[in-house]
Image (cartoon, helix red, strand yellow):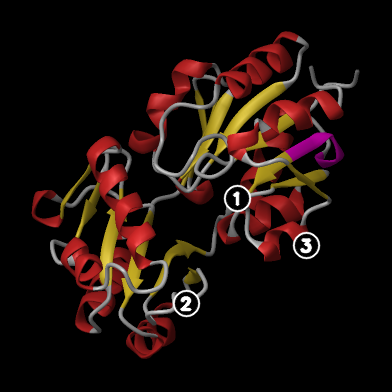
Amino acid sequence: MERKVIFLDIDGTLTEPGSNEPPALAQEAIRQARARGHQVFLCSGRNYAMLSPLLQYGFDGFVASSGGYIRCGDEVIYDCPMTEEQKRAAMDSLKENGVYRTVECIDGAYTDEGFKDFLRDHAGEGKNSELLRWREQIEASLDIRPMAEYKGQPVYKIVIMSPSRENLKRPMEVLGEDFMFCLQKEEEAGFINGEIVNRQFDKGKAVERVCAYLQIPLEGSIAFGDSANDREMLEMAGLSICMANGSEEMKKLADEVCPSVKDDGLWKAFKAHQLI
């Protein structure tokens, strides 16, 4: 079979959200696919520190920070943190307008101290309690620290939580030329979560960069994802597959839908496409 390069989102695709352990059959699918000569990459919004625990399961490389940092084997092929001017403008504008920030660096992530208090205040409203449980889980396991510990390291992207769309109006005007605002759908309680990402990269551009480096045509790429921040990756890949637990929007966008992460969707899709 012709060699393929496979891109796997993490949260909601390879693992349950916030987890660092793929299901046993997902691990076996990755092992068998690589044994057959295919290359398997993580392609995540997580920064390097947050995805690094998964590297023990065997990957040929990874895309971190939504495409801002890419490694193939031991070679860093792309590294694009914000400039100091971009970082300062983003941090100041978001803070001035009451938007909670989590900055993501190579070594970890740093979050505004009031962020979890805001979530607790809204726990039980709509789906917010689920988001709070997820947040507490990843803060315990994925090296997210208080903003007071941030020492000015290069920033690759900023995760945001806004009390309303109105709070984002001015930051979007000020920062829109340099950054994309990738927003999830509003929760029933009204607040908005998402991230701001440098327009120089996204997961789709990352797929293109990795394929060019490996000299594999885009038609030979397969991408698995589940949520809005996977859009560009799914659009760019030769074959796009959304998990059954994914958003309805991404299911419509993808070429196929496979079973959920809890139902061994990756294993079943790898089998269906004769990758293993």
Q: Which residue is mark 1?
A: 203
Reply yes or no: does residue 219 show up in magenta.
yes
Residue 126 vs residue 110, the one in the foreground: 126
Q: Which residue: 81% across, 24% down?
A: 271
Q: Would you place residue 211 above or below residue 245 in this image?
A: above
Q: What distance separates the C-alpha of mark 1 from that of mark 3?
A: 18 Å
The verdict on residue 266 being magenta is: no
Magenta-colored span: 218-222
Q: Amino acid at mark 1?
A: Lys
Identify which residue, 33 or 76, lies in the foreground.
Answer: 33
Viewer-side label of 1, 3: 3
Comparing 196 with 116, the one in front is: 116
Provide the secondary structure element on which disc 1 rests.
Answer: helix
Please give the label number shown on residue 186.
2
- Please give the label number shown on residue 252: 3
Which residue is at a point 33% across and 62% down the rendered structure image?
129
Query: In what quadrant of the picture does the N terminus appear?
Result: top right
